[in-house]
Amino acid sequence: MSQPRISAYASLANGNALPTRVIQGAKTLQARTSHYIAVDAVHDELAVPNPFAQAILFFRGGANGNEAPIRIIQGPKTLLNAPDNVAVDPVHREVFTASFPTDSILVFRGDASGDVEPVRILHGPNTKLDRPIRVEVDPMNNVLAVVTDHAILVFNRTDKGDAAPKWVISGPKTGVGTRFGTRDVRLFSVGKKIIAGAAIRGPGTTRSAERNEEDGEGRRGGQRFIGVWKYGDNGDIAPWAVLNATPITKIPGSRLALNPEGGDLVVGGDGQVSVYHLPEIFQQRD
Amino acid sequence: MPGRPDRARIQWSVVAAILLTVTCWMQTRHWSGAAVAQEANKTSERRPLVLDRAPARNIADPNPVFRAIVIDAEHGEVFMANDKESAGTSILVYPTQFPPTNRIMEPRRRIAGPKTDLGMVCGLALSVEHGEMYSVSGETGTLNVYPLDARGNVGPGRQLRGVIPRASAGVFLDVKNDELFITTEHVNRISVYPRTFQQDQEPLRYIQGPTTGLADPHGIYVDSETNEIFVSNHGNWRKTETGEGEVRGPDSLTRTSLGYNIPGRALPLAPSTGKFLPPSITVHSRTASGNAALLRMIQGPHTLLNLPDGLYRDPVSGEIIVANTGDDSVLFFDKDASGDAAPVRVLKGTATKLKGPAGVSIDAKRNELWVASWDGHIAGVFPRTANGNVAPLRVIRTAAESAPLASMGRIGAVAYDPKRKEILAPN
């Protein structure tokens, strides 16, 4: 890329579309390609991490061009270390980030600014947090989902300290975890669904043999898919629904966004964004 | 005719059985994992609902872009890195001399394909003497070496993999001293390798640490006459430790480079050190090592630096040339510039056609300045001493002039804004 940016496209955009706006420029204080962006629709804000300057940036929801953040969480008290993800709970006005270097989840007040301490920290051996890369919060059902090296862990939203997860989705039948290419987890509150990219390895495949098959998303071969699990799924359990990577589906990656109103699953990767119309996922009941 | 109904029933039964088999096969053919699950564990007999269908819409720019740029003046060729995944990352080779045209120009050679293992090719360097080309991948932290005349889907002849910290950006070959210099954004580092490196060879030395002034380094240029290293920095800073980012097994200090699949020890919760610094050009001794203090720094409001990227030094005037991505310009600084120094000239304006310039180089043989303009899908050729709002002598373009500007690079995430009904894509 030429510079860090956030490009916005109309939900019905298709092809080599013009963005409706682009947030870019030195004033935005973005670093490299941001690995995450959270939309706070209630307070009309965007939250974006900056791992190099150890900061979380907040923009107006309608920010455009070379526009500065409206506030920044940054400083020694924050304990931020290479933050590259952020989730927002607009109901309880809190901000979450999974800390990959420190095996922890840091929680801040949603309107925090400057050098502030986390209001809660989830950290310790019982948490099973092992290289957490993403966190997502469901304020309606009070759950917190975290992608780790080899699992999706689900906690109570207000858990802190050395709390154990209430559900652990992990194992060869699930195919989830960073090592399998999971880069995102999304929660559909109304239907109580957990959505994540994953991969099932073929029998006899070893990591070293797959080394040269790893692509830019860190995927290491195997059968890639986007899986949908239900709240309460626990253990080595197959997903409730799958969107497999096939020549027809052409899944470009495992970065995910949900548009429940339109019944769309948005998938990003490989320098493109694909929109899948999957109303089955967004039904309130199965 | 008592046998007829039976035959018809049998025929229909066969058809029904085939249909049932096909249906079951369609349900399970993409889900071997579920079948395995069901066989292995009776408590997990869920049969996933298969939702396989084509995307309703796809947003992508199919046109290549130009980022790093290096020139083989002897053979009259220019090499440019295309890091656009939706166009297939590649190294594109064009002649330096061609009649001016506004049409899309096909490259003379194209290096691309799975065997090349190019990754997100960010930096390029050449050795005409040894007939080699060097490419650095930002995401995978690899340095590849190809023959200078390579084309198509060819594997690298040599490769450094697993020893360069992840997210490297720029590479420069110091011909005189036969050394390769590489910058790494995530861990504020310059690594130095012998040009003749072997697989997994350790660096000869590296510059890294809080007194180096490195802050999200990008472009790099080494002057072997003055023994100076010039580095462009975006200004995102945190305190790094010397050796950080090196892959040395489970205890290595690699977590902060965000290589998710690279093992590394967990760090304690500790006070943050991050801060935003103004963008800069840092100048280091060519032989510096470890946490060595920088020699000088160009930084401040008068410099006009704004997301600086590619760097080059004018072989005649000694000026430091900077691709100033953030304000669509190229800046030229005096050879001894330091502090809050204003550029001695600026190439900027609508006539230049520059949008998001990321790479610069000089064709000393033909006295021309080359600028890779990422957003505009073009490389522009200017007189070496161009100044102000001047039109390029000629351009190489990969997309029609009417095509939308490139606005989507590597996708780091996607989000949906329900209020504006927009898809947001950091890239």
Image (spheres, rainbow, N blue to C red):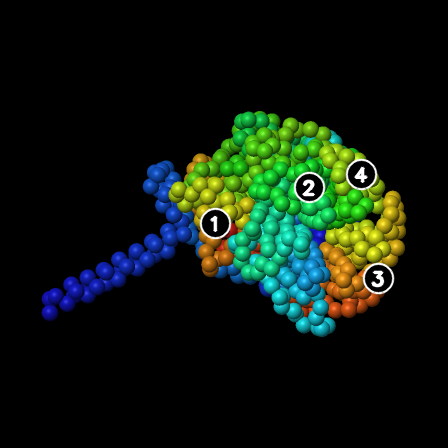
Residue at 53% from the left image edge and 29% from the top image edge: A164
Mark 4 falls within which chain?
B
Q: Residues within 10 Å of mark 3 (few under 14, many from 20)?
A: few
* Residue A89: quadrant of the picture: top right
Residue at 81% from the left image edge and 55% from the top image edge: B314
| Element at label 4 | loop
Q: Look at mark 1 in the image and give the residue it sits on.
A: A225
Q: Earlier in the sequence, mark 4 or mark 2?
A: 2
Q: Residues within 10 Å of mark 4 (few under 14, many from 20)?
A: some
* Amino acid type, callout 2: Val
Label total for image = 4
Residue at 52% from the left image edge and 54% from the top image edge: B115
Mark 2 falls within which chain?
B
Give a yes or no on whether discs 4 and 2 share a subunit. yes
| Element at label 1 | strand
Give a yes or no on whether discs 2 and 1 share a subunit. no
Q: Nearer the viewer, residue B257 or B61?
A: B257
Give the foreground label among 1 and 4.
4
Q: Look at mark 3 in the image and give the residue it sits on.
A: B385
Q: Look at mark 4 in the image and give the residue it sits on.
A: B294
Instruction: Say if residue A62 shows up in the picture.
Output: no
Give the foreground label among 2 and 1.
2
Location of residue B124 in the rendering, given as x and y in whole percent from the top left corner: 67, 53
Q: Look at mark 2 in the image and give the residue it sits on.
A: B192
Mark 1 falls within which chain?
A
Location of residue A132 in the rendering, given as x and y in whole percent from the top left corner: 58, 36
- Mark 3–mark 2 Cα distance, whole angstroms, equals 32 Å
Residue at 78% from the left image edge and 48% from the top image edge: B223
Q: Earlier in the sequence, mark 3 or mark 2?
A: 2
* Amino acid type, callout 4: Leu
